[in-house]
Image: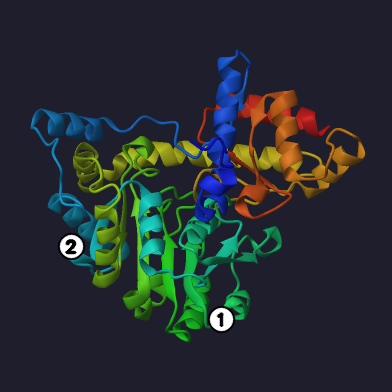
Amino acid sequence: MSNSSMLPGEVLSQRVQAIKESPTLAITAKAGKYKAEGRPIIGLAAGEPDFDTPQHIKDAAIAAINAGYTKYTPVSGIPALKQAIVNKFKTENGFDYSTNEVIVGVGGKQTIFNLCLAVLNKGDEVIVPAPYWVSYADIAMVAEAVPVIIDCGIEQGFKLLPAQLEAAITTKTKIVMLNSPSNPTGAVYNLAELQALGEVLLKHPHILVATDDMYEHVNLTGEKFYNILNAAPALKDRCVVLNGVSKAYSMTGWRIGYAAGPAYIIKAMEILQSQSTSNATSISQHAAVAALTGSQECIKPMVKAFKERHKYVVDRFNSMSGLSCLMAGGAFYAFPDARAAIARLHKAGKIAVATDMALAEYLLESFDVAVVPGSAFGAEGYFRISFATSMDNLRNALDRIEKALN
C-alpha cells in the first residue's frame, strides 16, 4: 500500500475550489456559535422574515401528511401547485404560461442553479449587476461560465443603467440576471427603467433574461410591481421568471421556489432536477398550494411591520457619522454606504485594514452585532443588515453600531 497522502487541492474538483461558502450563512453560523457560548449577539445577517408561517399554510401541510401525501411527486411539481403558479402569474403579473412552462424547485436557489446548468456552456458570460445576491456569481461559475460584474453603486440608486448593459454585452453573453426588489439593496426598477433595459435586450436576440422576483410581495412603497416582461413582452420567448414562497409567506425552511419560461428550457431544468433532488418535498408543495390560492391578507401585517422598521433603520443610519443609506423600494434589507466610516475607523486604529470585512468583524467581535459585508455582494465599502427582526433588536443593534462608529 502506498503511504503517500493526497492534498485537498488534488482531491477536490476545480469547480468547488472556484466558489466560496455563502458569506451570509457563514456569518450567521459564527454569530450562532457565539450566541451558544452565551454572548449577547444580535444577528442581522440572515435574510428571512421573523414571522411564523401563516396558520392556514401550516394546516394544509398537516392535512397533507394526514392524507398520506408523503410519496414521490412528479419531478416538476404536483399538478395543483403548477396550476396555482400559472394562475398567480396570470392574475398578479399578466403573464400567460401553461403548466409545461412551469417548474417547482427545492427553493428559489435550485431553480437558478438548474437554469444556469441547463443553458450555460464553458466560457459563456453572465451579466450580474452589483450589488448582487451572493449566489448569482458562484452559480454561474459552477456552470463554468464567467460572471461579468457591473458596478451599480449608491450614486445611481443601485440600478443597472441601459448604457452599462449595452457596454457589457459581447457575443459570449448568455444570461442577464435581474433582481427586483433587490437583495441586498432593496432597489426596485420602475416600468420606465425596465423599458429602457428591455430596449437594449431586444437588440441582442442571443441573450436570455433571468428575472428573480423573490421579494415581489415585500413592497415597501405600495407602488405597482413591474417585471421586465411587463416592460418588454417581446422578451417572453427568452425570459425565465424566478420566484417562490419563502419571503412573501415566511416559508424559508419549506424550500419551495418556482420558475416559468420557454417549455424547452423548463424541460431541461426538469431533466437536471430528475438527476439531483427529484421532486421538492411533497408536503411543502401542498402547503405552497394553500399559500398561493388562499387569502393573501396574511402578507399585509408582515409588510406593515417591515415598512415601520425600514423607516426607523434608514433614518438611524443616516444620522450616524460616516454612513449614507437610501430608502428601499422592497425586500427587508438596508445597505448603507460605510466607506467614510471605514476610512475613519482605520485611521483611528480601530480596524487593521480599511475594508468592509474588517468593519463586519469589528462589529461582531467588539460589539456583538452580526452584519454582512458589502463585498459579499460585490460592493466593497458597504454592509447589509436585515430588518426582519424585532424593533427591540433593531434599536439595540443600531445603538451598538452607533457606539462602534463613534
The residue that appears at 51% across and 43% down in the rendered structure is: 332
Circle 1 Cα neighbour tier, 10 Å, few/some/many (<14 / 14–19 / ≥20): few
- Examine the rendered structure and indicate whether residue 175 appears above or below residue 390: below
The residue that appears at 55% across and 67% down in the rendered structure is: 146
* Residue 45 in sight here: no
* Residue 31 in sight here: yes
| Horizontal arrangement in the rendering, residue 86 relative to residue 247 (left or right) | left
Find residue 196 and report its horizontal and vertical position in percent. 52, 78
Disc 2, SS: helix
Find residue 18 and report its horizontal and vertical position in percent. 57, 54
Splitting the image into 4 quarters, where does residue 232 fall? bottom left
Farthest residue to the left: give it.
67
Splitting the image into 4 quarters, where does residue 35 fall? top right
> Which is more N-terminal, label 1 or label 2?
2
Q: Nearer the viewer, residue 228 or 192?
A: 228
Find residue 382 and report its horizontal and vertical position in percent. 70, 48
The residue type indicated by label 2 comes to Thr
Residue that mark 2 sits on: 99
Farthest residue to the front: give it.
1
The residue type indicated by label 1 comes to Thr
| Colouring rule applied to residues | rainbow
Circle 2 Cα neighbour tier, 10 Å, few/some/many (<14 / 14–19 / ≥20): some
Residue that mark 1 sits on: 170
